[in-house]
Amino acid sequence: MQHLTPEQIARYASRSGDVDEIIGVAQHFEVCAGCRDRAAAILDPGTGEVSHVRKERRVSGARPALAAMSRRAQTNVAAFVMWVVAVAAVVALLMYVLLRR
Ligand SMILES: [Zn+2]
Protein backbone atom coordinates (compact mmCIF):
# COMPACT_ATOMS: atom_id res chain seq x y z
CA MET A 1 0.00 0.00 0.00
CA GLN A 2 1.36 3.37 -0.98
CA HIS A 3 1.03 5.92 1.79
CA LEU A 4 0.00 9.52 1.41
CA THR A 5 2.49 12.30 1.00
CA PRO A 6 2.24 15.41 3.18
CA GLU A 7 1.40 17.29 -0.02
CA GLN A 8 -1.54 14.98 -0.69
CA ILE A 9 -2.76 15.42 2.87
CA ALA A 10 -2.45 19.20 2.59
CA ARG A 11 -4.32 19.21 -0.72
CA TYR A 12 -7.00 16.99 0.81
CA ALA A 13 -7.34 19.30 3.83
CA SER A 14 -7.62 22.41 1.69
CA ARG A 15 -9.76 20.61 -0.92
CA SER A 16 -7.40 21.92 -3.55
CA GLY A 17 -6.61 18.58 -5.13
CA ASP A 18 -8.72 17.07 -7.86
CA VAL A 19 -11.76 15.03 -6.92
CA ASP A 20 -10.15 11.67 -7.65
CA GLU A 21 -7.26 12.51 -5.36
CA ILE A 22 -9.51 13.73 -2.56
CA ILE A 23 -11.59 10.56 -2.78
CA GLY A 24 -8.45 8.45 -2.90
CA VAL A 25 -7.03 10.20 0.16
CA ALA A 26 -10.32 9.80 2.03
CA GLN A 27 -10.40 6.11 1.18
CA HIS A 28 -6.80 5.75 2.31
CA PHE A 29 -7.62 7.41 5.63
CA GLU A 30 -10.36 4.86 6.14
CA VAL A 31 -7.94 1.96 5.94
CA CYS A 32 -4.73 3.54 7.26
CA ALA A 33 -4.54 4.79 10.82
CA GLY A 34 -0.93 5.74 10.29
CA CYS A 35 -1.77 8.30 7.63
CA ARG A 36 -4.71 9.55 9.71
CA ASP A 37 -2.28 10.19 12.53
CA ARG A 38 0.19 11.85 10.19
CA ALA A 39 -2.60 14.00 8.75
CA ALA A 40 -3.69 15.01 12.24
CA ALA A 41 -0.11 15.92 13.09
CA ILE A 42 0.32 17.89 9.87
CA LEU A 43 -3.00 19.71 10.05
CA ASP A 44 -2.99 20.28 13.80
CA PRO A 45 0.64 20.27 14.89
CA GLY A 46 1.26 19.85 18.59
CA THR A 47 -2.40 19.50 19.50
CA GLY A 48 -2.44 15.77 20.12
CA GLU A 49 -2.79 16.72 23.78
CA VAL A 50 -5.67 19.07 23.06
CA SER A 51 -7.74 16.45 21.30
CA HIS A 52 -7.05 14.11 24.23
CA VAL A 53 -8.17 16.79 26.69
CA ARG A 54 -11.24 17.51 24.58
CA LYS A 55 -12.16 13.85 24.67
CA GLU A 56 -11.80 13.76 28.45
CA ARG A 57 -13.90 16.91 28.81
CA ARG A 58 -16.60 15.31 26.71
CA VAL A 59 -16.56 12.17 28.86
CA SER A 60 -16.81 14.08 32.14
CA GLY A 61 -19.13 16.70 30.74
CA ALA A 62 -21.79 16.35 33.43
CA ARG A 63 -19.45 17.34 36.22
CA PRO A 64 -18.48 20.77 34.84
CA ALA A 65 -22.12 21.30 33.92
CA LEU A 66 -23.14 20.67 37.52
CA ALA A 67 -20.37 22.95 38.74
CA ALA A 68 -21.56 25.65 36.38
CA MET A 69 -25.13 25.16 37.59
CA SER A 70 -24.12 25.44 41.24
CA ARG A 71 -22.05 28.52 40.38
CA ARG A 72 -25.10 29.99 38.69
CA ALA A 73 -27.23 29.10 41.72
CA GLN A 74 -24.76 30.86 43.99
CA THR A 75 -24.90 33.89 41.72
CA ASN A 76 -28.69 33.80 41.91
CA VAL A 77 -28.57 33.63 45.72
CA ALA A 78 -26.22 36.59 45.78
CA ALA A 79 -28.49 38.50 43.42
CA PHE A 80 -31.50 37.60 45.57
CA VAL A 81 -29.75 38.77 48.74
CA MET A 82 -28.79 42.01 47.03
CA TRP A 83 -32.40 42.43 45.91
CA VAL A 84 -33.72 41.77 49.43
CA VAL A 85 -31.25 44.25 50.89
CA ALA A 86 -32.25 46.84 48.31
CA VAL A 87 -35.96 46.30 49.00
CA ALA A 88 -35.36 46.44 52.76
CA ALA A 89 -33.45 49.69 52.32
CA VAL A 90 -36.29 51.18 50.26
CA VAL A 91 -38.89 50.00 52.79
CA ALA A 92 -36.82 51.39 55.67
CA LEU A 93 -36.49 54.70 53.85
CA LEU A 94 -40.26 54.79 53.17
CA MET A 95 -41.02 53.95 56.82
CA TYR A 96 -38.61 56.62 57.94
CA VAL A 97 -40.21 59.21 55.65
CA LEU A 98 -43.78 58.16 56.55
CA LEU A 99 -43.16 57.99 60.28
CA ARG A 100 -41.45 61.35 60.26
CA ARG A 101 -44.54 63.08 58.86
ZN1 LIG B 1 -1.14 5.25 4.82
Image (cartoon, grey):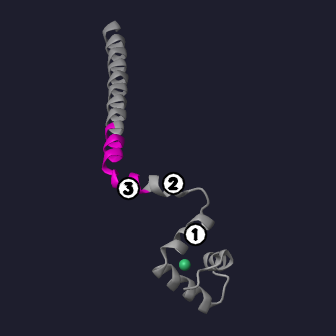
Q: CA distance from mark 2 to mark 3?
A: 12 Å
Q: Nearer the viewer, mark 3 or mark 1?
A: 1
**SS state under label 1:** helix
* Residue that mark 2 sits on: 50
Outermost residue to the front? 1
Q: Which residues are magenta?
A: 55-70
| Chief SS of the magenta region | helix
Residue 58's label in the rendered image is 3
Which residue shows up at 61% across the image and 67% down it?
A: 43
Q: Secondary structure at mark 3?
A: helix
* Name of the residue lying farthest toward the bottom: 20
The kind of residue tagged 2 is Val
Q: Are marks 2 and 1 in contact (CB under 8 Å)?
A: no
Q: CA distance from mark 3 to mark 1?
A: 24 Å
Q: Residue at x 33, y 50 (%)?
A: 60
- Residue appearing at x 61%, y 80% in the figure: 4
Counting from the top left corner in percent of width and height, residue 42 is at 62, 67
| Circle 2/circle 3 CB separation < 8 Å | no
Label 2 packing within 10 angstroms: few (<14), some (14-19), many (20+): few
- Assess mark 2: CB under 8 A from ligand 1? no
**Up-down: is 3 above or below 45?**
below
Q: Counting residues from the N terminus, which is met first, the one under dot 2 or under dot 3?
A: 2
Against 95, residue 6 (above or below) is: below
| Residue nearer the viewer, 67 or 93 | 67
For image coordinates 63% across by 81% down, the residue present is 15
Dot 2 or dot 1, earlier in sequence: 1
- Is 81 situated left or right of 20 in this image? left
Q: Quadrant of the C terminus?
A: top left
Dot 3 or dot 1: first in sequence order is 1
Circle on res. 38: 1
Q: Amino acid at mark 1?
A: Arg
